[in-house]
Amino acid sequence: MLQPKLSILDETDSGLDVDAMRIVADGVNKMHTSETSTIVITHYDRLLDMIKPNVVHILYNGRIVKTGGPELAGEIEKRGYDWIKAEADK
């Protein structure tokens, strides 16, 4: 439990100010090794600026509808989710 191979963090940034978010991000970054994985569930690009994900998945209606690199999170920050929903509903 103290050295997990997989961690799932569900909206750990909810209600946090920027200083607390940095503390969380630093902890996640320190845990990252070639032998560990972390799934970070968030609605905000700010946390991903601090963690620097390798892969970004977008979930919609219970399934992954889009996958990309860190730039995908930035694109969603600029464009919102409607374009992803439109693509997924085709």
Image (cartoon, grey):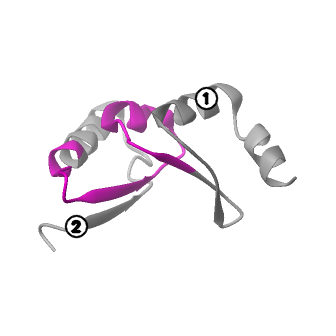
State the CA–CA distance, disc 2 to disc 1: 30 Å
| Three-letter code for the amino acid on which mark 2 is drawn | Lys
Residue at 44% in and 45% down: 55
Residue located beneath label 2 in the image: 5
Front-lying residue, 62 or 26: 62
Residue 23 screen position, x and y as percent: 22, 40
Residue at 44% in and 32% down: 46
Q: Quadrant of residue 8?
A: bottom left
Residue at 19% in and 68% down: 4
Residue 52 screen position, x and y as percent: 35, 35
SS type, badge 2: loop
Residue at 15% in and 45% down: 30
Classify mark 2: residues with Cα within 10 Å, few (<14), some (14-19) or many (20+). Answer: some
Q: Residue furthest left?
A: 2
Q: Is residue 2 above or below residue 67?
A: below
| Three-letter code for the amino acid on which mark 1 is drawn | Glu
Residue located beneath label 1 in the image: 75
Residue 62 screen position, x and y as percent: 66, 67
Q: Left or right? Give the position of 68 relative to 12.
A: right
SS type, badge 1: helix
